[in-house]
Image: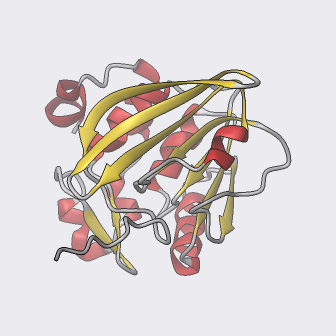
Amino acid sequence: MLEQQIRPSDVLNPRVLKAFESLKREQFLDAELSGLAYSDTALPIGFGQVMLPPVIDGRLLQVLNVQDHEGVLEIGTGTGYFTALLAQLSKWVTSVDIVAELSECALQNLQQLGINNVSLCIGDASQAWPLDDRIDVIVSTAAFTVIPDSYLQSLKVGGRMLAVVGEDEVMTAVMVTRVSEREWNTESHFETAIPAMINAEPKAKFEF
């Protein structure tokens, strides 16, 4: 996977590559899908949700450049694969999913691997998620049409949020960095397409 998919996509951060090497994607999938674990496609994990392709995971982590002293909020746990990657790179991860069954599955997967710097939460994080303090990194594994301001306000100065933003097939991975108390810098990194955030889907367009 690293040589055929991840490195050719300009994912070159040694810590990110090491995190990929340390985890087996098939451990986060149903047995019947294990043979497809390293295919460059989204894979169903139940409840209408998917595991993102490894190339997208890698590119997101390359852009984020998570450091080992940082705390991370992940929006969209799924079965915990991307969560586990984040856990390898950061000091701690809080991960939220709206589907309780997926969060429970992720908990089992993480426990089996001995990953203990992750807190899993269940709830709707489509607009906001309460935090005890400002945070270093926020990343979403589902797409927003617009990044909610509540998340930008939750960042520390110097903190950053990465999310895929857009509608239908026109989406871009966007990173917003808080540069001061009242100023944020926005950078567009790469085009992609991933499923929309539950309860933050694009509004239906009517044609007359």
Q: Is residue 172 above or below residue 68?
A: below
Q: Single out the residue that lies furthest toward the right.
A: 132
Q: Is 8 left or right of 61, judged from the image as shown?
A: left
The residue at 61%/70% (across/down) is: 124
Tell me residue 130's x, y (percent).
77, 56
Tell me residue 198's x, y (percent).
46, 70
Tell me residue 48's x, y (percent).
35, 77
Q: Is 110 left or right of 202, judged from the image as shown?
A: right
Choose between 153 and 17: the one closer to the eye. 153
Q: Is 154 left or right of 106, judged from the image as shown?
A: right
Choose between 100 and 196: the one closer to the eye. 196
Q: Single out the residue that lies furthest toward the front.
A: 208
Image quarter (top left, top right, bottom left or bottom right) of the N terminus: top left
Q: Is residue 27 above or below residue 39?
A: below
The residue at 45%/43% (across/down) is: 163
The residue at 61%/63% (across/down) is: 125
Q: Is residue 16 visible?
A: no
Q: Is residue 151 visible?
A: yes
Tell me residue 98's x, y (percent).
57, 72
